[in-house]
Amino acid sequence: MDTGTAELVPDGDGSGGWTVVVNGAPSSYVDLDNPTRLEFEYVQWTGHILDVVAPEAAPIDAVHIGGAGCTLALYTAATRPGSRQLVFDVDAALVVLARQAFGLKNVNGLRLKAADGRAGLATLPDASADVVIRDAFDQTAVPPHLATVEYHREVARVLRPDGIYVANVADNVQVRDSRVEAAAAQTVFTDVAMVAEPAQLRGRRYGNVLILASLTPLPEDALVRRLAGGAVRARYVGGERVRELTSGHHPHHDPT
């Protein structure tokens, strides 16, 4: 890999399941026999968001910042045939590995580009995406330029008025990073929410937090139902509670 090491680890049971390990950490899971199988908890939550971003089975336009095994792109292609998807990953060698190992060239409507996610966004037309998903990390942290107020403005430009932005944050027990990112999103978007395990939001564990944002009201009722009934219970937090969580946290800006 250009930015470190990558390993494809098979399940070992003869199935089509593979774990993509990047720099020693499990980065994504792909089941070639069943692309709707979402193994990681935060990926399952994102799958629920993809399920409600448009009417069932309707094709969408999706942008993925961070590729690895392209789990969510494969999920979207399987559940919403005809979707147009663009994946940006900064590591060209990882793009080649995923394309060859998982047959991504044969997935209709899916394009992979070796490019920085923010630079890639800058090339896209206004109001051209139904969903933008950011799942990109430099080691264990989100690259700083993918979390600023200015970055969120670029995401909002690319999204359609009713589109949804989803960002994955691997946060600590203080839940500080996701609060700062949510504060940045609040400066740009009308509606901002957070999704995590209840214990994570109470400061009892390290884990993933999803930040959701839209220029129009998020489909809260539908998401609450799906998250409550999922394999891994998650809590949807929106509105006034997010404003409470972000109070006193100052969003980051691009260097001047």
Image (cartoon, grey):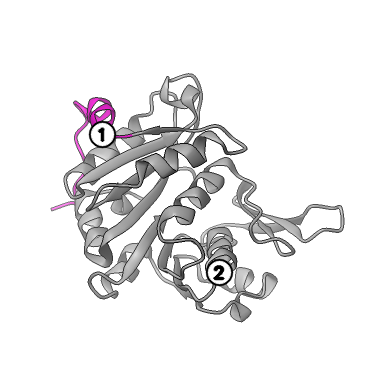
The verdict on residue 247 being magenta is yes
Residue receiving disc 1:
239
What's the residue at 21%, 40% (across, down)?
251
At 20% from the left and 27% from the top, the residue drawn is 247
Quarter holding residue 86: bottom left
Residue 190 can be seen in this image: yes
Q: Amino acid at mark 1?
A: Gly
In-front residue for pair 8/217: 217
Mark 1 or 2, nearer chain start: 2
Say above or below: 149 vs 177.
below
- Going by the picture, which residue comes out furthest to the left? 256
Q: Decide whether residue 255 is among the magenta residues.
A: yes
- Residue 85 vertical placement versus 7 (above, below): below
Please report the bounds of the magenta region as a residue range. 238-256
Vertical arrangement, residue 202 with respect to residue 192, above or below:
above
| Label 2 Cα neighbours within 10 Å, binned few <14 / some 14-19 / many ≥20 | many
Horizontally, residue 243 falls left or right of residue 223, namely left
Q: Quadrant of the N terminus?
A: bottom right
The residue under label 2 is which amino acid type?
Ala
Residue 73 versus residue 226 in the image, above or below: below
- Residue 120 in the image: state x and y as whole percent: 34, 70
Give the numbered dot on residue 77: 2
* Label 2 residue SS: helix
Q: Which mark is residue 207?
A: none
